[in-house]
Image (spheres, rainbow, N blue to C red):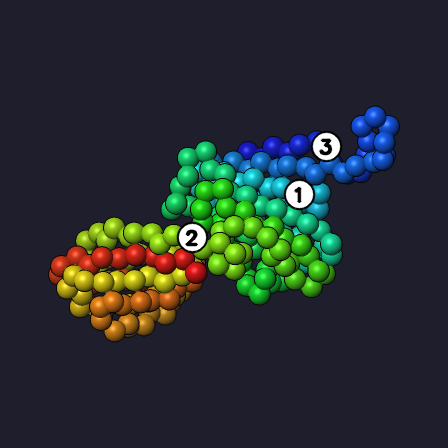
Amino acid sequence: MQITRSTDYGQSPVGPGGGAGYTYEPITKLVAAAADANPSPYAAQNNDFLIEVDASSQNVQVTLPAASGSKGQHKMIKRSDAAFAAANAVTVITADGSLIEGAASQSLNAQNSVIELKSDGTVWQVIGGSNSAAWGHVQPIANIAPGASPYTYTAQAAGSVVVTGGTVSNIQLKRGATTIAIAAVSPGVVPVSTGDQVITTYSVVPTMSFVPR
């Protein structure tokens, strides 16, 4: 992964024209390469403020420092792919497994999506951004293009897979090593978390959509 950091950070003792001091907020740019580990990991530094992520070529995982040692830290993470790759995920987790707004992880699923975070010493709180309903902005429904039956769709984010029409004989939800059957009705609505797989068997291709949470 290519990592570029601005060098200006910290408190300047003297502002422009000799006035009061002011704060520089550093920018860190991450550009993942196809040859990187999947997902390509980045451990956020204490002095990172804005982290811009380019996931055009690979999934990226940003790891926040432990909330317990980061009380008061303020970070923003923005997805800014050079060429938006909807199939690639940008995921935010924590180094110690502490929660981010009640969840183990958060994802940036849209171009120019942003999450703004602050640690209260126990968890990382989401205090702003635009990407999901939890942050005050709902992403649009995405069409899914089914392939040959049985077709497997892997969720890149939390939401629901909706299956309508066609001639569907079986719908299954797979999470890890566990697979369960879902009633093959129309419409079929299957709630999913990131990484879940929805396996649909049919003789006539149905219409499938993903509804972000």
Secondary structure under the numbered disc 1 in the rendered image: loop
Type of amino acid at the residue the image marks with label 3: Asp
Q: Earlier in the sequence, mark 1 or mark 3?
A: 3
Instruction: Give the residue displayed 45% in from the left and 55% down from the top.
Output: 138
Type of amino acid at the residue the image marks with label 2: Gln
For the residues labelled 2 and 1, the Cα–Cα distance comes to 25 Å
Instruction: Give the residue displayed 67% in from the left and 42% down from the top.
Output: 48
Instruction: Please state which of the two labelled residues, at mark 2 or mark 1, is closer to the viewer.
Output: 2
Q: Earlier in the sequence, mark 2 or mark 1?
A: 1
Judge the density around disc 3: few (<14), some (14-19), many (≥20) Cα neighbours within 10 Å. Answer: few
**Quadrant of the drawing holding the C terminus:** bottom left
Please name the residue that numbered disc 3 is placed on: 8
* Disc marking residue 49: 1
User: Quadrant of residue 20 in the image?
Assistant: top right
In the image, taking residue 199 as reference, residue 110 lies left or right, namely right
In the image, taking residue 167 as reference, residue 108 lies left or right, namely right
* Disc marking residue 139: 2
Judge the density around disc 1: few (<14), some (14-19), many (≥20) Cα neighbours within 10 Å. Answer: many
Say if residue 94 shows up in the picture: no
Q: Position of residue 145 (x, y in %)?
A: 25, 50
Q: Mark 2–mark 1 contact, CB under 8 Å?
A: no
Q: Nearer the viewer, residue 45 or 167?
A: 167
Q: Is residue 14 above or below residue 45?
A: above
Type of amino acid at the residue the image marks with label 1: Phe
Q: Mark 1–mark 3 contact, CB under 8 Å?
A: no
